[in-house]
Image: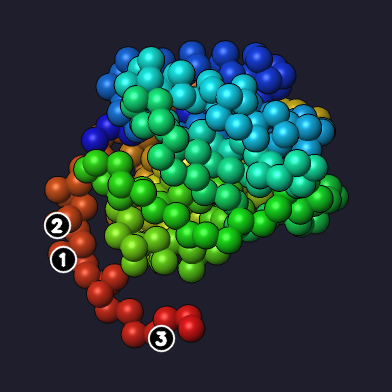
């Protein structure tokens, strides 16, 4: 399987962001990718009124949801739409929902971001309060994307390894982490966390990030990368918009898991 991660700036407003995302998905599909991952909040990045956005995306005809279906169908790819704010009830806080769309344009899986970024970043003095805008998700999600099993997560989830171990126990062979990592935390930890989650679970990791390190208000790190189960970066970007693609050597992964069967050696009791 060939996979791709898309990297965006997210500073064009909804229509411009979707157009830019569509361009890079087309480029990735043209390069042979059949599984494409967009970053967190790829359409609504920087928008203040996420309640309004969540209402607009409450049905499959919402602008970002319709975009995902149309683009996936047009390019015949599995498309993971980073996150979209989706309110399941009128007037309620939305979830940060990561939607997987099949090559025929159907939404086949949804992951609601479990861990919300309520953090004071000391390096910049900035306070983040995602829980002011979003509801916490609850469910661990894996989904079949033949020939792999894909584990879904988002951004801050990367700091909680137990989520990925649970996905590995459910059979995940590829882990997706669409993100909008801040420039300060991303420089320190982004690639480290991607590589750690890959090595711990002997999985490929697809990290698609927002990138605008020079933004004075909301700088994001970029560095989107595809990591193999040995922790090696096999494709990546720096701070530019674009895509990175790599062939996922699934036979090599199986051999690696056979020679290093760490997933079978866990002795700690499972959580009750």
> Quick one: which residue is furthest to the front in this view?
90
Q: Position of residue 181 (x, y in %)?
A: 63, 43
| CB atoms of marks 2 and 3 within 8 Å | no
Q: Which mark is residue 255?
A: 2
Quick check: 173 left or right of 58? left
Report if residue 184 is visible in the image.
no
Q: Quadrant of residue 86?
A: top right
Residue at x 26% of width, y 46% of height: 148
| CB atoms of marks 2 and 1 within 8 Å | yes
Q: Quadrant of the N terminus?
A: top left
Residue at x 27% of width, y 22% of height: 32
Foreground disc of the pair 1, 3: 3
Q: Which residue is mark 3?
A: 269
Q: Is residue 166 above or below residue 106?
A: below
Q: Position of residue 138 (x, y in %)?
A: 58, 61
Q: Quadrant of residue 159?
A: bottom right
Q: CA distance from mark 2 to mark 3?
A: 27 Å
The one of 52 and 207 positioned closer to us in this rendering: 52
Q: Position of residue 90 (x, y in %)?
A: 75, 41
Q: Which residue is mark 1?
A: 259
């Amino acid at each position: 399987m060939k996979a791709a991660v898309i990297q965006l700036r997210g500073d064009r407003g909804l229509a411009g962001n979707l157009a830019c995302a569509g361009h890079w998905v087309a480029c990735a599909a043209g390069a042979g990718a059949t599984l494409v991952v967009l970053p967190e909040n790829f359409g609504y990045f920087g928008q203040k009124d996420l309640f309004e956005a969540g209402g607009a995306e409450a049905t499959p005809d919402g602008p970002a949801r319709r975009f995902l279906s149309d683009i996936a169908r047009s390019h015949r790819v599995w498309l993971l739409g980073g996150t979209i704010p989706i309110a399941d009830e009128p007037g309620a806080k939305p979830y940060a929902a990561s939607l997987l769309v099949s090559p025929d344009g159907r939404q086949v899986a949804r992951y609601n971001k479990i861990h919300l970024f309520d953090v004071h970043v000391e390096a910049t003095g900035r306070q983040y309060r995602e829980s002011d805008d979003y509801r916490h998700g609850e469910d661990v999600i894996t989904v079949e994307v033949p020939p792999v099993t894909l584990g879904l997560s988002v951004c801050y989830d990367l700091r909680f390894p137990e989520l990925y171990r649970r996905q590995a126990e459910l059979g995940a062979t590829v882990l997706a982490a669409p993100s909008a990592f801040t420039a300060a935390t991303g420089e320190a930890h982004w690639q480290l966390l991607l590589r750690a989650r890959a090595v711990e679970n002997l999985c490929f990791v697809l990290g698609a990030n927002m990138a605008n390190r020079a933004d004075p208000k909301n700088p994001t790190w970029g560095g989107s990368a595809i990591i193999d189960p040995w922790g090696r970066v096999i494709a990546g970007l720096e701070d530019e918009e674009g895509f990175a693609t790599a062939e996922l050597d699934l036979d090599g992964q199986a051999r690696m898991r056979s020679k290093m069967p760490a997933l079978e050696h866990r002795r700690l009791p499972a959580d009750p």
